[in-house]
Image: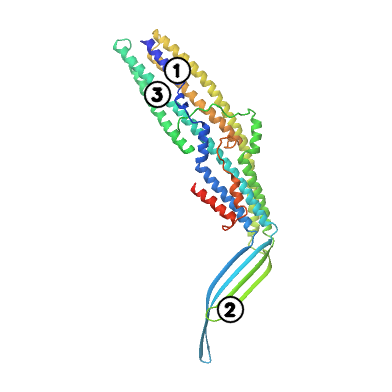
Amino acid sequence: MWTGRFRAIASAIGVVALTAAPYAVKAETLADALKSAYLNSGLLDQNRALLRSADEDVAQAVASLRPIIDWTTDISRDFSRTRSLNRTRNSGSTNLNLGITGSLLLYDFGRSDFLTEAAKETVLATRQTLISVEQVVLLTGVQAYMNVIRNQEFVALRQNNLRLLRQELRAARDRFEVGEVTRTDVAQAESAVALAQSGLAAAQGDLSRAIEEFREAVGRDPGALNTPGDLPQLDGNVQEAKSVALRRHPDLLQAQHNVTAAELNIRAAEAAKRPSLNLTARLGATEDLAESDFARSGSVGIELRGPIYRGGALTSAKRQSMAQRDAQLAELHLVGLQIKQDVGNAYANLRAARASRTASREAVRAAQVAFEGTREEAKLGARTTLDVLDAEQDLLDAQANLISANADVVIAAYSVLAAIGELTARDLNLGVQTYDPSAYYDLVKDAPISSSTQGQKLDRVLRALGKN
């Protein structure tokens, strides 16, 4: 009886190694999930809109260098009442006033140009922010994908373990009936089954949560997932990886553009203290609605205007710009340190995950040998039912650790790419239509009006974005 039962146990445990097989049949790949994460991400949509908003700052800065034309109109009622030589006289008139005013900035010591260039640098910084968000989205997708696989395999492992323990319980009860074991052996088997049922319920709960995380990260429910086979090719040279990260990581590039924008804002604040030269023009008409009187007027001139005293606001603005520049320089320094630390940590985590996977494989091998040895000794009466259950639990734990280690290696490998700045749809060759950050900028950088050809094209783009 023991020989047949242990053969069944060993055969079932061998099936555990193939728990991923049901998910490998026509399974979707990690690349499929990352494509969906890229296309369905609300976080990316949000930051793309923020980038378009930054693009509009450039358009508004460019518009300040163009003529400004306004119209005015008003209707006024003038009336008077006079008394002279005991005679009272009332008079009044109703006037319609129309006017058009225009001005054109001719020269302001470069202030408008500095503000325009600062806006462009902010656009470039915001583009890097979008890339950084893209990395977060894709890494979250990797984690969600692997956590579903991890918990699916945990559930399969727990289901198999429960099935084996129920066989043990039935065998223990049969042997108790014929007097081969005591009631204690049966109680131990019953306890093991109850604990296995609890472990399975917990694993199923973890799987449900992992599926919810996958739905949030990827934008849809997971199908049958295929365990990734090919991991990113990573150079083991940590120092070289740090050098690459300092050249291309979006967080560092963003900080560099922010420093440049802050420097330009200082120069704009300095130029604000100087005069500006403007061309002005005005056309006006006044019509007396009650009479036939009218007046027409116009003027063209050049205006030179400069500040004399504004309560210290201009000087404060310059000091503020300098403080912001200093803050951005400090941020640039801190970002560089953080990037180097993140690369070092990512590689350390990858090495630890790989070592854990190797150790877990050895632990599974050793636990398998120990279980088989305990089983053989139990057949000879040298081991108890509890010894067999303990050995089986050790094997279960080792297999669970291996499942986790396999998932951790994949997540750690992609975390290295994110730390370097290479976890983007383009770097991963996902084959998805990527967002072009310059497309909208090219449409709005010249500040087109709605009635122009470019403005109409821009309206179509905006309507398409709204539909999405």
Q: Residue at x 54, y 35 (%)?
A: 139
Q: Secondary structure at mark 2?
A: strand
Q: What's the residue type where badge 2 is placed?
A: Phe
Q: Secondary structure at mark 1?
A: helix
The answer to whether residue 220 of the structure is visible from this angle is: yes
Q: Is residue 138 above or below residue 400?
A: below
The answer to whether residue 188 of the structure is visible from this angle is: no
Mark 3 / mark 2, whichever is N-terminal: 3
Q: In the rendering, which numbered label is found on residue 438?
A: none
Question: Label 2 crowding class (10 Å Cα cut-off): few <14, some 14-19, many 20+?
Answer: few
Residue that mark 2 sits on: 294
Q: Residue furthest left?
A: 177
Q: Residue at x 60, y 43 (%)?
A: 128
Distance of mark 1 from mark 2, alpha carbons? 104 Å
Decide if residue 179 is on the left or right side of residue 152.
left
Q: Residue furthest top?
A: 380
Question: Label 3 crowding class (10 Å Cα cut-off): few <14, some 14-19, many 20+?
Answer: many
Estimate the x, y position of residue 286 in percent, counting from the top left.
58, 76
Question: Label 1 crowding class (10 Å Cα cut-off): few <14, some 14-19, many 20+?
Answer: few
**Location of residue 343 (image quadrant):** top right
Q: Is residue 136 above or below residue 377?
A: below
Q: Residue at x 59, y 57 (%)?
A: 452
Decide if residue 178 is on the left or right side of residue 63.
left
Q: What's the residue type where badge 3 is placed?
A: Gln
Mark 1 / mark 3, whichever is N-terminal: 1
Residue that mark 1 sits on: 14
Residue that mark 3 sits on: 159
